[in-house]
Amino acid sequence: MGTREDILGAAARIMRTQGYARATTKEIARAAGFSEAALYKHFQDKTEIFLRVLEEQLPGLAPVLDRLDGRVGTGDVRRNLEEVVATAVEFYTDSFPIAASVFSSQELLSAHRDRLRELGTGGPHAPQVLLARYLEAEQRLGRIDPSADPAAMAQLLLGACFQQAFLAAFSGDPAGREQRADLARRLVGGVLGATLGGAGG
């Protein structure tokens, strides 16, 4: 691995075990075996490191959501959603210990929120927006019932994924691959219910 990847790996380990608040750039650099100056050659600040950890060191929820635009009108809606849900459960489970510590103080949360705005990132609501957009597109094609509420469906699915991550963090017993797949089938089936149109596949 290169310097950048080593830094991200060290940051992920520290954030998982000690939380975001205690993962200083100095500590991250030390754990990666580099100087703090070397860290700043690759990243502007800790918030950028945090975002790159979420994108590059954890299960890839963003790529799965990004692929949805190309899947509109193709394949099986139910299976597309099951892939999103299974990945989201894994992503939120892995990221929960890191993200939760951002809420340890109002000052830290406010500073983090402000920095996200400066960086122009989508923030934690982005997955919901992308999933709702996919569901709206499928609805326009008649593959989801016109009476369905795509935004509410996205909220229900991703909200359930986040709750599972909370429960896993509390119990210390994260779901395995088969458990996540079964959970995805049940959640998607429960939310879709009768909302799939005749062409829903």
Image (tube, rainbow, N blue to C red):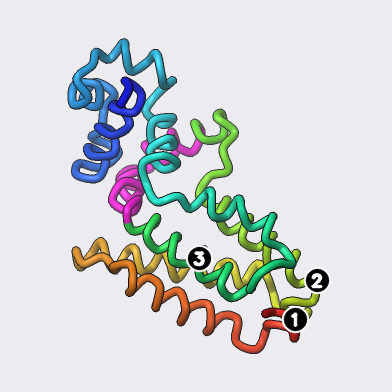
Q: In the rendered image, which quarter is residue 64 located in?
A: bottom right
Which tag, 3 or 1, sits closer to the chain's start? 3
> Which residue appears farthest toward the bottom when viewing the image?
194
Q: Circle 3 sits in a helix, a strand or a loop, which is it?
A: helix
Tell me residue 73's x, y (percent).
74, 67
Q: Give, as a three-letter code, the residue at label 2.
A: Leu
Disc 1 versus disc 2: nearer the observer: 1
What is the spatial separation of the Cα atoms under label 1 and label 2, in whole angstroms? 9 Å
Q: Residue at x 28, y 34 (%)?
A: 9
* Marks 1 and 2 in Cβ contact (< 8 Å): yes
Q: Residue at x 51, y 35 (%)?
A: 116
> Which residue appears farthest toward the top when viewing the image?
37
What is the spatial separation of the Cα atoms under label 3 and label 1, in whole angstroms? 19 Å
Tell me residue 196's x, y (percent).
68, 82
User: Pointer 2: residues within 10 angstroms few (<14), some, or many (20+)?
Assistant: some
Which tag, 2 or 3, sits closer to the chain's start? 3
Q: Circle 2 sits in a helix, a strand or a loop, which is it?
A: loop
User: Which residue position holds label 1?
Assistant: 199
User: Which residue position holds label 3?
Assistant: 83
The residue segment tinted magenta is 94-114
Image-based side of 80 in relation to 166, left or right: right
User: Which residue position holds label 2?
Assistant: 141
Image-based side of 145 in relation to 88, left or right: right
* Residue 108: in magenta span: yes
User: Pointer 1: residues within 10 angstroms few (<14), some, or many (20+)?
Assistant: some
What is the spatial separation of the Cα atoms under label 2 and label 3, in whole angstroms? 21 Å
Q: Give, as a three-letter code, the residue at label 3.
A: Glu
Image quarter (top left, top right, bottom left or bottom right) of the C terminus: bottom right
Tell me residue 136's x, y (percent).
73, 66
Q: Give, as a three-letter code, the residue at label 1.
A: Ala
